[in-house]
Amino acid sequence: MLTCATVIGGKLNGLGVCRSLARGGVVSYVVDRSRWQAGMWSRHARPVLTRDLEGAPLIDCLLQLQATLKQRPFLVITDEMAVLTVSEHREILASKFLFRLPPHDTVLMLYDKGRFHEFAIAAGLPVPNAAIVGRTSELGKIRALRFPVIMKPIDKRNFHAGVAPRLAIAHNIGQAIEAGEELLQTSGKLIVQERVDGPDDSIYFCLFYRGRGATTVAMFTGRKLASIPPGTGSTAFCTAAAPEACHVLETLTRDLLKRIDYSGFGSVEYKWDPRERRFVIIEPTVGRTDWQEEGATLSGVNIPLEAYRHELGLSPERTDSRVQRNVWRGSFFNRLMLGSDFIPPDASVYDGYWRFDDPLPAIVHYPLDACCLAGSRLACWARSSIGDTQHLPRWLRHKAH
């Protein structure tokens, strides 16, 4: 019997990992706090509920699951906050699960946007100009930057808790000071980066798994075609990058991994800077798979399955041929909102949720997604038509602001 996998997180990322592993006949136990996450409904998944995806509840759930399975499952993290918990408790989990992470201090450095920026500058890595702001008296540092700027919390825990925004964009110093004062109250320390000019399709990502002996087991370089919301959001459509970009970005990525002696799943996002005529690092992802992971599988590079086979001492299955014409779409609603003019005419488009042979994730997810979208539109209408939204239900009032 094949060793099973345990996938932490049942959202789109986790669903893509389950489907990727299933191509090798691997059964995945998907751990999440909600039964309604799409990945919990895949025919390739065995759903496992936990009270939380971080802290003691997650560790207790993992240990209880492993005890019932009576084997050492391959562990894949798809949730950002779970990475910190697993890294902190790695000594307890190491004998129960097969997984690989960088040293804990490296995890913290890559997770902390400020520490990573300082490391990148010291190492001579290409990153946008930025300022680290820890208090309102330091907001004057932003004056030295070229506008517009992107302002992000260094620690994303408040964002994941729903009490702080993911980012803010400022086009002048006045906007930056105002946004900075608000973000410092809800998010703590900030990184303020010069925004790199260029459309969303100048954003690239390099996904990878680095195994024992510093071996790069699998690597895939992709290119965004569109983001949602445009300019600042997550990947809406993506495809394989052109070979010339792959060579440059994979060389940069391998150099970074070697410098920090990286292990396990991860990725690096890049953007072409037309002013500097070079690719710059936007941000790294540490210890987990990324949103576009199944896009790599559909393009011929199945990173989760290759990582699984590597850790179990099995021979690799992948081929070097990459499918340039496949496009991965995060959601059906992305096409409704963004159109499809940017999709190559000969491309085959794969929806992140829908598969004829695995339909339940889409059947469960899309009605819920439609309700959320309708709620957001209703909230915008309420704000523009009514003005004062304090009398609205709390869920709608939150959306309106």
Image (tube, helix red, strand yellow):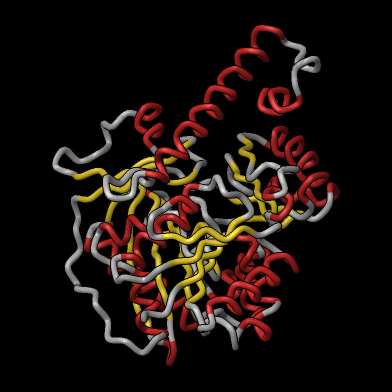
Along the line of sight, which residue is nearer the eye, 278 or 215? 215
Along the line of sight, which residue is nearer the eye, 147 or 399? 399
Question: Residue 335 placed where, x, y %?
Answer: 35, 32
* Residue 323 placement, left or right of 159: left
Q: Is residue 278 visible?
A: no
Q: Residue at x 37, y 84 (%)?
A: 310
Along the line of sight, which residue is nearer the eye, 26 or 228? 26
Question: Residue 100 placed where, x, y %?
Answer: 52, 81
Question: Residue 104 placed where, x, y %?
Answer: 66, 79
Q: Residue at x 58, y 24 (%)?
A: 376
* Residue 231 placement, left or right of 221: right
**Tally of numbered discs:** 0
Location of residue 281 with respect to 306 vertically, above or below: above
Location of residue 114 with respect to 37 vertically, above or below: below
Residue farthest to the top? 385
Location of residue 104 with respect to 85 vertically, above or below: below
Residue farthest to the bottom? 213
The quadrant the C terminus occupies is: top right
Q: Residue at x 42, y 50 (%)?
A: 275
The quadrant the N terminus occupies is: bottom left
> Which of the 4 image quadrants contains residue 348?
top left
Question: Residue 383 placed where, x, y %?
Answer: 67, 15
Q: Is residue 218 visible?
A: yes
Location of residue 190 with respect to 384 vertically, above or below: below
* Residue 392 placement, left or right of 206: right
Along the line of sight, which residue is nearer the eye, 372 or 238? 372
